[in-house]
Image: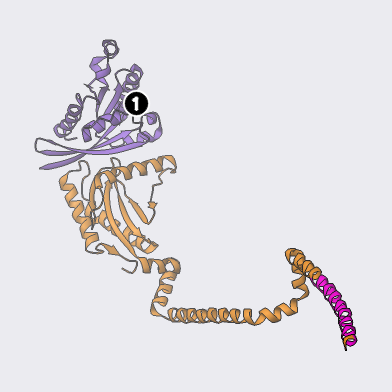
């Protein structure tokens, strides 16, 4: 069996649920308590896509570092980027849209970037209407587990397909 | 006869009365002096004065006792000092001492550091080859395999990145991390770096040996590899090279002498 290792960076404002998404994906347990990440947390998850073993190194970057120079270095060499926002807080959506258009799509063109709207279980119709659905790749809920595995799986499939 | 007896009794009464009065007076004097002495003894200043005034007498009394104790203590200390000098003399003229002295001169490492290194040594715990930008592990070697290599590689890269961004000048790179008795030496190359986890005393000689080893690895083994896509094959090749370099040469432990 072939084996590849890829770096995925999770970006997004504080409290959007990046750490919870990783915890749900890596450990399949959701911690309801708010986790404020300071700096960075790295986790590993191995999944199998057809005949390839894909090792995903997940770099969960603290939300408060979004605008700092340091996080540029954490992004270096990322094969994939998850831009995460909180579906109930439109300002976090605006922030990741801006980050994706102005930064990731410009400086990290070779990375696969997905926009994730998290906390979908708490979203109202009004919340959903505030977002441009065409720009959203996945609606997830770290609390219920909806679409979490699927989002990471899609990213891994993309790595195998494109041989990135 | 009866008259004589009466006169004798009268004389005794008179004499004894004088004695009793004399005794009573003397007893009063003694009590007074004892009171005064008690007061002086209870007063530290006056007691010190008493001792001060009677210095010669005190020395006469305590001298022999203290003298014996002091003499015994000094003899014991001189004996210990003598043993120490003998031990050091043997060490000074030993082959090990001369070897250490020459090595210190040649390498610039202090004799104390070499002595510590000789007695404690260093253990190689794990070696990592890590891609610089991604922090992805290219390969690892460990005699004991004690660390979660992928995660350690990622965290090391994050820490390295953090330190270099926060405190580093342009083009400067983090070269070592220390924790307790452990040291992580980082050897930086263009696309990757090596991280070497060691335990114990790490002197300049060990650092230099490792530097040579990694330069050799970079030149002969890793130079021809493409790191565009780190897969199982690349990892196997790098791990074999690391294993060859460290397992055969050093084994689990190595000392400055090697």
Farthest residue to the bottom: give it.
B1
Quadrant location of the N terminus of chain A? Answer: top left
Q: Which chain is orange?
A: B
Q: Residue at x 35, y 33 (%)?
A: A37
Report the residue marked by disc 1: A15
Q: Residue at x 36, y 55 (%)?
A: B182
Which of the 4 image quadrants contains residue B65? bottom right
Q: Position of residue B76 (x, y in %)?
A: 53, 80
Q: Nearer the viewer, residue B227 or A66?
A: A66
Quadrant location of the C terminus of chain A? Answer: top left
The answer to whether B20 appears left or right of B89 in the picture is right
Q: Position of residue B173 (x, y in %)?
A: 39, 47
The magenta segment is B3-30
Q: Nearer the viewer, residue B38 or B222?
A: B38
Q: Nearer the viewer, residue B194 or A34?
A: A34
| Residue A55 among magenta residues | no
Q: Residue at x 25, y 43 (%)?
A: B136
Task: Please state the chain letter of the residue tagged with numbered disc 1 in the rendered image.
Answer: A
Farthest residue to the front: give it.
B2
* Chain A tint as drawn: purple
The answer to whether B172 appears left or right of B123 in the picture is right
State how many labels appear.
1
């Amino acid at each position: 069996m072939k084996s590849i290792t890829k770096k995925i960076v999770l970006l997004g404002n504080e409290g959007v649920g990046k750490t919870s998404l990783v915890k749900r994906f890596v450990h399949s347990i959701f911690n309801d308590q708010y986790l404020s990440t300071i700096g960075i947390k790295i986790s590993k998850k191995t999944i199998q896509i057809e005949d390839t073993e894909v090792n995903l190194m997940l770099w969960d970057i603290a939300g408060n570092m979004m605008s700092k120079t340091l996080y540029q270095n954490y992004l270096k060499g990322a094969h994939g980027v998850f831009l995460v926002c909180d579906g109930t807080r439109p300002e976090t959506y605006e922030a990741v849209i801006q980050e994706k258009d102005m930064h990731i799509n410009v400086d990290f063109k070779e990375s696969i970037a997905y926009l994730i709207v998290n906390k979908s279980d708490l979203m109202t119709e009004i919340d959903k209407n505030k977002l441009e659905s065409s720009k959203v790749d996945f609606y997830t809920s770290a609390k219920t587990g909806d679409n979490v595995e699927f989002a990471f799986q899609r990213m891994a499939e993309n790595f195998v397909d494109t041989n990135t | 006869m009866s008259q004589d007896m009466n006169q004798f009794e009268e004389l005794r009464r008179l004499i004894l009365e004088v004695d009793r009065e004399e005794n009573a007076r003397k007893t009063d004097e003694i009590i007074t002096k004892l009171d005064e002495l008690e007061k002086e003894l209870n007063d530290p200043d006056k007691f010190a004065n008493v001792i001060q005034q009677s210095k010669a007498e005190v020395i006469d009394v305590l001298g022999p006792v203290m003298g014996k104790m002091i003499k015994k203590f000094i003899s014991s200390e001189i004996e210990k000092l003598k043993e120490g000098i003998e031990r050091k003399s043997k060490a000074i003229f030993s082959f090990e001492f001369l070897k250490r002295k020459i090595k210190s001169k040649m390498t610039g490492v202090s004799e104390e550091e070499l002595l510590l290194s000789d007695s404690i040594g260093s253990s190689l715990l794990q070696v990592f080859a890590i891609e610089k930008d991604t922090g992805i592990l290219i390969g690892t070697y460990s005699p004991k395999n004690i660390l979660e290599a992928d995660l350690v590689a990622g965290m090391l890269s994050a820490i390295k990145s953090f330190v270099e961004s926060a405190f580093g000048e342009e083009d400067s790179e983090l070269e070592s991390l220390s924790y307790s008795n452990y040291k992580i030496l980082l050897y930086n190359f263009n696309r990757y770096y090596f991280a070497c986890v060691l335990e114990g005393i790490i002197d300049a000689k060990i650092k230099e040996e490792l530097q040579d080893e990694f330069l050799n690895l970079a030149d002969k083994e890793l130079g021809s590899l493409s790191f565009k896509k780190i897969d199982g094959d690349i990892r196997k090749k790098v791990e074999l090279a690391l294993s060859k370099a460290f397992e055969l040469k050093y084994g689990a432990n190595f000392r400055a002498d090697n």
